[in-house]
Image: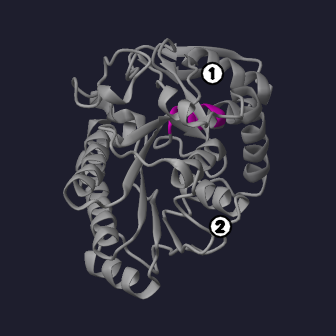
Amino acid sequence: MEMLINKDDRFFVAGHRGMAGSAICRALKRSGYENLLTASRDQLDLLNPQAVQHWFASKKPTVVVLAAAKVGGIHANNAYPADFLLENMKIQTNVIETAWRSGVKRLLFLGSSCIYPKFAEQPIKEESLLTGSLEATNEWYALAKITGIKLCQSLRMQYGFDAISLMPTNLYGPGDNYHPENSHVLPALIRRFYEAKKSSLESVSCWGTGSPLREFLHVDDLGDACVFVLENWKPNPDDIQFLNVGTGLDLKISELATYIANIIGYKGNILWDASKPDGTPKKQLDVSKLRDLGWSSSISLKDGLRDTIHTFKEHMEQNLVRSI
């Protein structure tokens, strides 16, 4: 099969310092793609359309990966709904439209599994998009991501622009955000149990009932999936122009908490605060389309958690943990 990208391409990874973006950069380099273009926020404000246009005209990327986004957990989504919607839509519109107008040959947009309805049939197929109401705890972020998917789809339909999208499940691993209030569930649990052990706390209280089912993908697996689809996946003439990426496996949040506590060595009690929201009751992606193309995840949850917690401990000791 002929590769859809090559080693001479100039890759612009937007959001290269973020968790997903940095993993995508690592994966591209592992696969021999050395010509990477990146820019910090000081160098390029993705919220500024003129700045984005000028940067594209100057750097002339041929392949774009859009991994930049404003992200956060339930608390952040509830507290800053307008920020999540406005900032993500501006970033997406600026980068995707400019890539198209600049003649970029291939664009990969990174979405999120939160785009799907709260009560979508499980495991969730790509065809479930826009078939029901969204989960209220992250609908603003989800709406922005759906807009990005549809922008890519419409540009392909109307102008033949080669834009594809991936919908990853919950990510974890190097570069995650461990903020006590604004982080996602897995890094929040790691930090909570780490601090509880250090402070010899008798118990740890966690949000919700612990009963929701979630799927988790190591971010380095996502990076490999991104390179795979850039090289191999041409969706035409398929109606579906985005793919789910995950492990196809899920577990209860209470089980995840127990795994993390055990790896960290916390021996106290784990309590659940049912007055806090659970979010979607179950979210497991159907990853059969990507698997049929020849890609599947390779890092098990237990192995990934051990490595992630080991790195987290080292970074906490060196005051290097990302907490924003």
Nearer to the camera, 81 or 117: 117
Q: Magenta stretch mostly in which secondary structure?
A: helix
At x 37%, y 85%, the residue is: 57
Residue 88 placement (x, y as % from top left): 31, 55
Q: Label 1 vs label 2: CA separation?
A: 35 Å
Q: Which residue is mark 1?
A: 256
Q: Which residue is mark 2?
A: 33
Tell me the element at label 1. helix
Nearer to the camera, 59 or 302: 59
Give the residues in magenta: 184-190
Residue 49 placement (x, y as % from top left): 27, 75
Tell me the element at label 2. loop
Is 226 contained in the magenta span? no
At x 26%, y 56%, the residue is: 89
Q: Quadrant of residue 37?
A: bottom right
Residue 314 placement (x, y as % from top left): 79, 49
Give the residue type at disc 1.
Leu
| Residue 114: numbered disc | none
Direction left: furthest residue: 158
Q: Is residue 136 shown left or right of residue 300? A: left
Q: Quadrant of residue 47?
A: bottom left
Q: Residues within 10 Å of mark 1 (few under 14, many from 20)?
A: many
Q: Is residue 208 shown left or right of residue 21? A: left
At x 60%, y 31%, the residue is: 189
Is 187 contained in the magenta span? yes
